Amino acid sequence: MKEEIIMAGFGGQGVMSMGKLLAYAGMKEGDEVSWMPSYGPEMRGGTANCTVIISSEKIPSPLSSRPDTVMVMNLPSLEKFAPMVKEGGTILINSSLIAKEVERDDIEVIKVPANEIANELGNSRVANMVMLGAYLARKNIVKLDTVKKSLKDVLPERRHDLIPINEEALDRGAALVK
Amino acid sequence: MKEEIIMAGFGGQGVMSMGKLLAYAGMKEGDEVSWMPSYGPEMRGGTANCTVIISSEKIPSPLSSRPDTVMVMNLPSLEKFAPMVKEGGTILINSSLIAKEVERDDIEVIKVPANEIANELGNSRVANMVMLGAYLARKNIVKLDTVKKSLKDVLPERRHDLIPINEEALDRGAALVK
Amino acid sequence: MKLVAGYPDSLTEKPFHYCPGCTHGIIHRLVAEVIDELGIREETIGVAPVGCSVLAYEYFDVDMFEASHGRAPAVATGVKRVHPDKIVFTYQGDGDLASIGTAEIIHAANRGEKITTIFVNNAIYGMTGGQMAPTTLVGQKTTTSPFGRDTNTAGHPIKISEMLSVLDGSAYIARVSVHDPKHIRQAKKAIKKAFQVQIEGKGFALVEVLSACPTNWGMAPVEAVKWLADNMVPTYPLGEFKEVE
Amino acid sequence: MKLVAGYPDSLTEKPFHYCPGCTHGIIHRLVAEVIDELGIREETIGVAPVGCSVLAYEYFDVDMFEASHGRAPAVATGVKRVHPDKIVFTYQGDGDLASIGTAEIIHAANRGEKITTIFVNNAIYGMTGGQMAPTTLVGQKTTTSPFGRDTNTAGHPIKISEMLSVLDGSAYIARVSVHDPKHIRQAKKAIKKAFQVQIEGKGFALVEVLSACPTNWGMAPVEAVKWLADNMVPTYPLGEFKEVE
Amino acid sequence: MEQVKRVVFDEERCKGCELCTTVCPKNIVKMADRINSHGYHPAEVAAQEECISCGLCAMICPDVVIRVYRPE
Amino acid sequence: MEQVKRVVFDEERCKGCELCTTVCPKNIVKMADRINSHGYHPAEVAAQEECISCGLCAMICPDVVIRVYRPE
Amino acid sequence: MGEKILMKGNEAIAEAAIKAGCRYFFGYPITPQNALPEYMSRRLPEVGGVFLQAESEVAASNMVYGAAGAGARVLTSSSSPGISLKMEGISYIAGAELPAVIVNMMRGGPGLGGIQPSQSDYFQATKGGGHGDYRLVVLAPSSVQEAVDLTMEAFEIADRYRNPVMIVGDGIIGQMMEPVEFKKEIDPADLPKKDWATDGAKGREKNVINSLFLDPRELEKHNLKLKAKYDKMKEKEVRYETYKMDDAELVIVAYGTTARIALSAIELAREKGIKVGLIRPISLFPFPEKIIAEAAGKVNSFLVVEMSAGQMVEDVRLAVNGKKEVYFYGRTGGMVPSPEEIVEEIVKIGGAIK
Amino acid sequence: MGEKILMKGNEAIAEAAIKAGCRYFFGYPITPQNALPEYMSRRLPEVGGVFLQAESEVAASNMVYGAAGAGARVLTSSSSPGISLKMEGISYIAGAELPAVIVNMMRGGPGLGGIQPSQSDYFQATKGGGHGDYRLVVLAPSSVQEAVDLTMEAFEIADRYRNPVMIVGDGIIGQMMEPVEFKKEIDPADLPKKDWATDGAKGREKNVINSLFLDPRELEKHNLKLKAKYDKMKEKEVRYETYKMDDAELVIVAYGTTARIALSAIELAREKGIKVGLIRPISLFPFPEKIIAEAAGKVNSFLVVEMSAGQMVEDVRLAVNGKKEVYFYGRTGGMVPSPEEIVEEIVKIGGAIK
Ligand SMILES: Cc1ncc(C[n+]2csc(CCOP(=O)(O)OP(=O)(O)O)c2C)c(N)n1
Ligand SMILES: Cc1ncc(C[n+]2csc(CCOP(=O)(O)OP(=O)(O)O)c2C)c(N)n1
Ligand code: SF4
Ligand code: SF4
Ligand code: SF4
Ligand code: SF4
């Protein structure tokens, strides 16, 4: 098993921590994992993305030029990463913010109204977890449960009160594709 | 023709300028010349020496490990350089300050009471010129006359009043070995 | 209608890359306005630092250098010596000028190098993500003083303007702030003087401008300028420290 | 008979390589005497500069470093942070401290680094053969200011003690001279204080010692100390600039 | 037409820092609800007629967004 | 025997700088005619009995040549 | 210990240093290694150590000189322009034979350049960017775990030889997270005392830390001593890894990040039926020339892949010594080669081999 | 002009710079090159130029950056430790493509080392002691006259390529006197105007002197442009001299001072009947690899002689590429090899050849 995932969005949409959480959970399950952030110029603003690789064997390149899965939280990310998805791969789209359709028919497209659901839950910042939940349900790389259990290790102590809402968001996302 | 000469003495005995004068005169006569000073540590005191090479052809190394001629103005220099003189070469010794004999019989030894003569002339600082005069008379590398004519180019303007005494010193040295 | 506040000629059209509310932008505009008002755009050569204002060379519409970190005064010296009749300025942050570039600014000042320095003191390293600067306030938390600046191990905020004023070569030294319009107006006056001093060949001129870094201070811009007024100004007294006639 | 003036324990037996009449020798002896008197020979770590006193590590009979040119305060900082309970001093010339090492001395002082610096100001680069220093007097001829130091291109003699006194981290700053016994006695007092300040953990301490370089000034030693008294002392006022209680 | 306005915002340059809103003596500089292409809520002055052309908003704007005119 | 002297010169260290000769209140420190092995004329005090053990010569000597004693 | 933690390379190196008994860090901020000093600024005070942000890289390298000479295990880190500023200091540290560990998270150059990953400081690291004949042991991890292991080893090597050790990485190694395990932890109090260090000459002869030898005979003697040390390193400290060399017809030589990418390229190439292997130098100095020379007797050709305009390729060519063709593929300025590009190169060479 | 004058190398280089139209010197004192700045401090004011003693080598290199960017011909000089401090600045000068001439009168290292002649900064000069993929043109005169000629040429090359040029020598080249002739004199006013330089954007678009490219694609493009320039140098700027290569069985490769000594050794060896020739690289970068590769087809073996622990020998081995044995003889720390020692080495190799 080897899964290469790219997650992308605006800075602030939580793509980095979504990636860390996934990688952490993978590690917990005994897989080899790597998490690689894009690191911007010594300057402000713009988009952020990270690459997570989860594998049963040692990971060669921590970068991915043909990811199995891409999750995009905003439009610029869609445009940048949709063309890269491996044939037969999957793209998850934050349909709350992205109206545009994917112009490829060789990949699976999953639309996740992440912000809407997050807003329903009362905190727009958990849109990333909705997305991750959907991903976890679709691909059997890491167990949803392991991800939930990882929350307390990955979130800083002072954010632990947010664990329940994060769990809920993961579930809601998962429910979308189940 | 190629002549390698090392001149050595205490700092202040004028061995550097004696070498420059010789090299300059050589150049004036159309020879290839080089003048290479020892350059001390970034520190004070001690002895000084320079190597002059005069040749009808391009000069390979500007250093000399087997000089044709050595002129020593003080005892430490004798001890350092006497062993280096080429077989059949010449050593000129400032006998005013060096009592010690040279322990080699394969080289020519010329004793020059340089300081005594210089003092007779009324300026102990021209001992170097006495030495040089002796050398020029012994070896026909550069003409005494050219050296004399070079004095005005090598001495800074403000020292031009010393030209006559320098010339006299050169003559007295030359007279010694003629 | 008459234009009361416009877009200076000495700025290119390029939007600044600075964070929202970063007062580097104000200072850029002031410098550009002064260059406009003195009519020296085509005589001026600027030197950008390494720091958030590294891209200053894209914003000022004058001949520009991008210098290595901290060495802008040395670069400016090289330029000024070649073109003594041109106006040369450096624009530097506090990491750039007060830390790595300490020797260069002090010796440019001491030589009385006829250049103008705009010294943007925001008490932090902006570009690299909020590390402690030598100008960081006592107790201020940064990414490399996570427990707050401790004077016992890191010393006190360094007083550049005061220090440079001691040197014979400095002709004009002032400290200003840009936290409100009144102070911005004063800042502009000081910057203008600092260029005039150069034009008149009097010697080295520096204006230390207290500036906000909302991003690395972890504050909203409005909060940041308030913090500037409330905390930095008391630590760094404003005023003209030196003015040679 | 009682020994009134002897050979300090904290000096090795090695004769100094300094030129005849070079007052580096006096300053060495004073430092050694102070170390003896404070009984800290076995607690002291010294840092030699690059300059005529580069071989100071052969003369002081304490643990020593030979630092790179100008960086002795940084080296001393490294040492002191590892051994906060030891006494660390640097011995530096004016090229070393006031030129290439400007940033290092200023930041050591600003951090309040608990070290002692003996700053030997002889207004010239001795070791390299008499080039201009930032401390060279106005009009003074050196091998790189052959027409005399011109303030228009080379600025004025830099006032290190005055500048360092501005910084909050400096605890003791004094300027002394060694041109006659009276001043030598004062110099020793200041040096002693500068070590005591460190022992008491008060902060950074520096003593600027005006010193003669007969060789590169082109003077006989007796003439040189006179020149020191007549020319350097007026340019560089003696005294204690700062003393933190 | 534009020129009847006293305060003109180059909206695309605005980063929504709100500094201008704090200095207006007439308190008429407000943040708009809309978003510019960089994702910022731009500042605006609806009540142009209340503007006294003091220029303070422009003075403090870090992004040279604002032009201010005074009737001649 | 040595110890009857008040001023003792480590002659081989002396560089003949003459500084010591300028500070002696009794004016008894003089340069010797002889030369030490480094080529310097060393300083000396012949009139030991005139020495008042003030230590000034030692104080100014840059080469730690001089030891001064005072009778107890 | 023993437990796996997910950590960034920069932070993992910092923690590894602490686990190796390092309690002193002197550095100056620069992207992309800031997470390292920042981590140190939080952690060192917890373990009774000292974090000091120096006024510059020049000062930092001299603080390292001081702390190392004082007997401590000490770390500094920077990135390309900052490392250039440390060149004089590093030459002094090597000249005075002081143990210290220096991290260079290389970025694109020259000049201010950029901040993206690069390997264009290879020459500077391995041949001596500073003056004089000195060498650093240069270690190039290609995973976060290896960064941890090599950092801990670096301190041992530094002490063993009294020589600075440099760890080279790039923004990828520095910023990526991978699971790591800290296999041991050293209490600095347990480290053997360095009897040459300066800590006050109490009841012993004084110690001197120095690189000055005014007499050229002495300085030559010193240089010969250094050379003997470097020769010993060449004998004992060579580190490398090989992959699928048994049947390889073409061998890629790559280090650090690039070697990871090469592994992906090898997968792809082998899928295409091209037998490609990898030699991954882990120590860049001493360079694993023997294994390369041996390989030269077996494989058809070499492909050196670097994020530079071609630097390590010279060492590979020196090792191959004309026996086989050595090809080069490089990306510069922060561009990272993709596995696909490398395969394309391999295919091209394949054509050349036939 | 045309007249022969007896001059020290250091002063001759200074005068040559002035004759080449250089009016700006920024430097910091260090042995053994002090005569150069000292000469400049006297001469430059006479010709309306500027001599400025910088506060440090770091500052000096950045003043050079400023003056070069401002369009002037500018010189700086130093010796080994000082050159190390200039590494960041030199990388910037190369990165921003500025013409400038840098003199390194090498001394024994590492660290403070000593002040006697050395060639142990070869790697630093030719491979880039600073960060990033940049190259200097490196010229190594072996006589005072050649120092003059190469200095004048250095300014031309620097302007032609917008690239810094380094002249390397040592205390022997710097302090020895030989007769020199200045063959021409350039009035700076006659030099073509540099339209990229900063002198106030009067009636034109502004000029920017810069080495920052935040987008790695841009920075790679910049690096490729630089590489193309370096490749062109390799094609056009190779300089070397050969001596008695016609019948040589063994060839010495040596540069600068060492090449002069090698000439003496060749005399001695030929007296003994050993046919020895010399290849003397004059440009160390670009390195004269072709002539060496050609020689590898003819001679029996190579002997590289350097005042270092072995640096240029790597470039020679790369050029020879395994075709013949390359021997090395080096002295370090300021020791100068004697002709006799070299002959001894030759005799030893002679034994090896048979
Ligand atoms: C030699 C070198 N060291 C360090 C850096 C990294 N660096 C870039 S900007 C900067 C400091 C920026 O802070 P400051 O000067 O205060 O300016 P600001 O960003 O706050 O405006 C540093 C350390 C560098 N580019 N070069
Ligand atoms: C990096 C570096 N730059 C320059 C030098 C050369 N250098 C040696 S000592 C010295 C200056 C000495 O002057 P100062 O510090 O005033 O001490 P003094 O010799 O007068 O006691 C210089 C420039 C060096 N060794 N290293
Ligand atoms: S990081 Fe700070 S200084 Fe830099 S642009 Fe942002 S607010 Fe301004
Ligand atoms: S050169 Fe000057 S400072 Fe150096 S030892 Fe001689 S007199 Fe003293
Ligand atoms: S100050 Fe400028 S950037 Fe900030 S909100 Fe107002 S108009 Fe926008
Ligand atoms: S002061 Fe010292 S060195 Fe000088 S003459 Fe007197 S005894 Fe000799």
Image (cartoon, coloured by chain):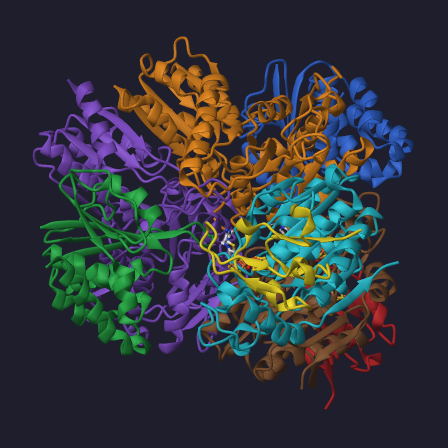
Chain colours: A green, B blue, C cyan, D brown, E yellow, F red, G purple, H orange
**Against D211, is C37 above or below?**
above
Whether residue G124 sits left or right of residue C212 in the image: it is: left
Q: Is residue G280 left or right of residue H147?
A: left
- In the rendered image, residue C63, in percent from the top left (x then y), is placed at 66, 38
Where is residue B124? Give x, y as percent: 82, 40
Q: Is residue F65 visible?
A: no
Q: Residue furthest bottom?
A: F72
Q: Quadrant of ligand 6?
A: bottom right
Q: Position of residue H352 (x, y in %)?
A: 27, 24
Residue with the most extreme right position: B161
Is G317 displayed left or right of G274 in the figure?
right
Quarter where residue F33 is shown: bottom right
The residue drawn where x is 17% and y is 64% is A25
| Position of the N terminus of chain B by quadrant | top right
Q: Quadrant of residue B56?
A: top right
Residue at left offset 62%, top offset 72%: C232
Q: Looking at the picture, how far across and down is residue C139, in whole percent? A: 53, 77
